[in-house]
């Protein structure tokens, strides 16, 4: 094959007319393909030269740490826990058998209400540091505790002295007589089989523990009030709830928006004709004590 190139006299210097002289169409095809490839390669090189350059101090590898810093997840500081609106009181005798260290209370009450937990417990005998630590470990599923008070269980003599010093001893005796004695018609004369009274075991059934329950509830209310004054700087809890540790919760506690704060709420059939230790998420008794309204859930 022979080929030669001619430059037209009147053509610009940049324009070159290449003429191919060939004996077959195959060479024409390859030549055209080469020209197209060169044209495309020239466009790529030109685009790279015209692109803005980015300078990285310290050489091309210095960009890697900066890029890694951009891609690294930003550490978000932990958000502060919203102040609790419920104070949960637990306590009583801490030497009872407590199912799963209180896990059902944690699963079905704490997880729903997000309360601050107050422990007003008692122990039989002197509550030394080791005994108190062991007792609290038995309800470890309820940690953290806002405040803890563990005292020796009051004896009947101590409770009797407190009732006599209240100034209402004669009223207590009168209330516990007749139909208020706890003796159901046809029941044995043995007081140990009578229904416990609010004043048991001092007055009425000597085996009842109602005063022990009221004793721990009173201590817990005092702790809640002190915590509101000190740690919460005067901010009051909306509700104060009591629940027994030896009970096992099988379902979530109802959400608070379903329970009108204008009422006292008790489990159906568990009012026992008055104050008791059944679970009850009730209005805070510290700012507005009102024992009169009563509703059942």
Image: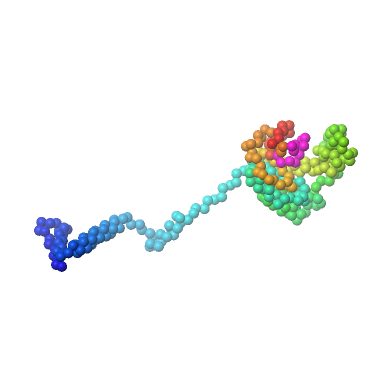
Q: Is residue 30 left or right of residue 253?
A: left
Tell me where the magenta segment starts and ends, as one range.
269-280
The residue under the point 23% across, 59% down is 36
What kind of secondary structure does the magenta stretch mostly adopt?
loop
- Residue 27 within the segment the image draws in magenta: no
**Residue 271, percent from left and from top:** 75, 36
The residue under the point 49% across, 53% down is 74
**Residue 166, percent from left and from top:** 82, 37
Q: Residue furthest left?
A: 9
- Nearest the eye: 134 or 277: 277
The residue under the point 72% across, 37% down is 268
Q: Quadrant of the N terminus?
A: bottom left
**Residue 228, percent from left and from top:** 67, 41
Looking at the picture, does residue 203 appear above or below residue 66?
above
Looking at the picture, does residue 139 appear above or below residue 260?
below
Q: Quadrant of the C terminus?
A: top right
**Residue 123, percent from left and from top:** 78, 50
Looking at the picture, does residue 207 appear above or below residue 72?
above
Q: Quadrant of residue 38?
A: bottom left
Render colour scheme: rainbow
Q: Residue furthest right?
A: 189
């Amino acid at each position: 094959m022979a080929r030669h190139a001619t430059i037209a006299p009147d053509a610009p210097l940049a324009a070159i007319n290449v003429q191919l002289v060939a004996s077959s169409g195959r060479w024409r095809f390859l030549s055209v393909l080469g020209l197209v490839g060169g044209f495309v390669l020239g466009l790529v090189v030109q685009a790279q030269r015209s692109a803005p350059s980015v300078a990285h101090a310290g050489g091309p590898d210095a960009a890697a740490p900066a890029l890694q810093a951009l891609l690294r997840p930003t550490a978000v500081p932990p958000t502060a826990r919203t102040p609790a609106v419920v104070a949960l009181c637990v306590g009583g005798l801490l030497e009872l058998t407590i199912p799963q260290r209180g896990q059902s209370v944690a699963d079905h009450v704490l997880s729903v209400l997000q309360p601050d937990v107050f422990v007003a417990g008692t122990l039989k005998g002197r509550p030394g540091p080791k005994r108190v630590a062991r007792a609290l470990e038995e309800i470890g599923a309820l940690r953290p505790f806002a405040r803890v008070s563990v005292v020796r269980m009051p004896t009947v003599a101590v409770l009797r002295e407190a009732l006599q010093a209240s100034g209402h001893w004669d009223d207590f005796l009168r209330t516990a007589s007749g139909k208020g004695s706890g003796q159901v018609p046809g029941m044995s004369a043995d007081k140990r089989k009578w229904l416990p009274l609010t004043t048991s075991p001092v007055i009425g059934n000597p085996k009842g523990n109602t005063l022990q329950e009221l004793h721990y509830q009173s201590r817990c209310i005092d702790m809640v009030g002190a915590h509101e004054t000190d740690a919460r700087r005067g901010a009051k809890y909306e509700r104060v709830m009591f629940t027994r540790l030896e009970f096992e919760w099988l379902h979530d506690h109802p959400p608070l928006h379903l329970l009108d704060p204008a009422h006292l709420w008790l489990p159906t059939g568990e009012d026992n004709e008055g104050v008791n230790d059944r679970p009850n998420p009730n209005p805070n008794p510290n700012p507005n004590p009102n024992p009169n309204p009563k509703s059942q859930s």
